[in-house]
Image (tube, helix red, strand yellow):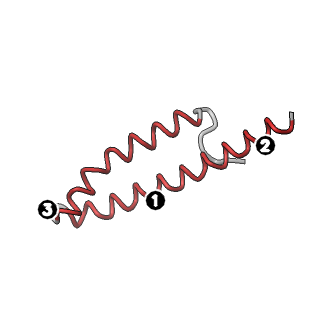
Amino acid sequence: MTSFKQEKGMREELENIIRNLTEVKEDLDKVEAGSYGYKSAAPRARKALMEASKELREIRTAVQEHKKGHEEK
């Protein structure tokens, strides 16, 4: 059983992850350039990337469960 928000669809969850990752791009630019604020941007970027990874794993599990559900019919 997946722990991600079942009331939202898989597609909506994926769009939310993409939106969050798009917001992280500015922090990644700071880290790569070593510009002002890069030391605080790095942990924010790492945290967002880890959360996205976990959420994507949950969606992947949900996709597999849906696939198995269709195969059993």
Q: Which residue is drawn at 54% across and 50% down?
A: 56
The local crowd at label 3, few if under 14, some if 14 to 19, many if 20 or more residues have their Cα within 10 Å, is few
Residue 19 is situated, as x and y percent measured from the top left of the image, at 39, 40
Q: Residue at x 50, y 40 (%)?
A: 14
The reply to whether the C-beta atoms of the residues labelled 1 and 2 are less than 8 Å apart is: no
Q: Which amino acid does label 1 sit on?
A: Met
Q: Which of 2 and 64 is in front in this view?
A: 64
Residue with the mark numbered 1 = 50
Numbered tag placed on residue 13 in the rendering: none
Discs 1/2, front: 2
Query: Which residue, given by chain and number where applicable, does mark 3 sit on?
Result: 35
Badge 3 element: loop
Q: Which amino acid does label 3 sit on?
A: Ser
Q: What element carries label 2?
A: helix
Q: 30 left or right of 53?
A: left
Q: How crowded is mark 1: few (under 14 residues within 10 Å), some or many (20 or more)?
A: few
Mark 3 → mark 1, Cα distance in angstroms:
23 Å
Which mark identifies residue 68? 2
Q: In which quarter of the image is residue 59?
A: top right
Q: Position of residue 54 (x, y in %)?
A: 54, 55
Q: Earlier in the sequence, mark 3 or mark 1?
A: 3
